[in-house]
Image: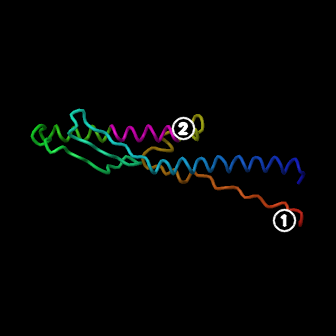
Amino acid sequence: MSDEFRLAIDELADEYNRQAAQLRDAYGKLNELVATARSEDRMVTVTVGPRGQVQNIELDPRVYRKLSASELAQSIMEQIGAATGEVSARTQELMAPFVPDGLPYEELFGEGASFESFLPQPVELPSRESESRR
């Protein structure tokens, strides 16, 4: 392999590995996302995790005197929606640099999608010594 060709391959491999490392870093940050939403009256607070799963619901003790059961249920659902929307927006923001143009974001991050299958593996090139032995 010529030195120029080898240099070009090395540069491509370095760039690929750099981008793969950035992608792994972003994916790690995805797993740490948490969002909390609080109702305007501060009676209901909901925290959701990286995939929108409810992690915590806090109710002000006065909520039982102020809201009917249906109003409480509606407030909880609204806060779940708000917190989930925030996690979704932050996920899209984190991953936007890696989504190819024309590929719908939902195909990668929609319900049931697993991003791990899209993570590239690092490239390891043979050393110059092993090539010279051939």
Range of residues picked out in magenta: 82-94
Q: CA distance from mark 1 to mark 2?
A: 39 Å
Nearer-the-camera pick, 123 or 102: 123
| Residue picked out by circle 2 | 96
Residue 96 percent across, percent down from the top left: 54, 38
Nearer-the-camera pick, 45 or 99: 45
| Residue picked out by circle 1 | 130
- Residue located at (84% from left, 65% from top): 130
- Residue located at (50% from left, 37% from top): 93
Residue 41 percent across, percent down from the top left: 21, 34
- Residue located at (58% from left, 41% from top): 98
| Amino acid identity at mark 2 | Ala
Which mark is first along the chain, 2 or 1? 2
Residue 89 left/right relative to 64: right
Report the magenta stretch's main SS. helix
Helix, strand or loop under label 1: helix
Q: Residues within 10 Å of mark 2 (few under 14, many from 20)?
A: few
Q: In the displayed structure, would residue 120 be above or below residue 45?
A: below
Residue 35 percent across, percent down from the top left: 37, 43
* In the image, farthest residue toward the bottom: 133
| Amino acid identity at mark 1 | Ser
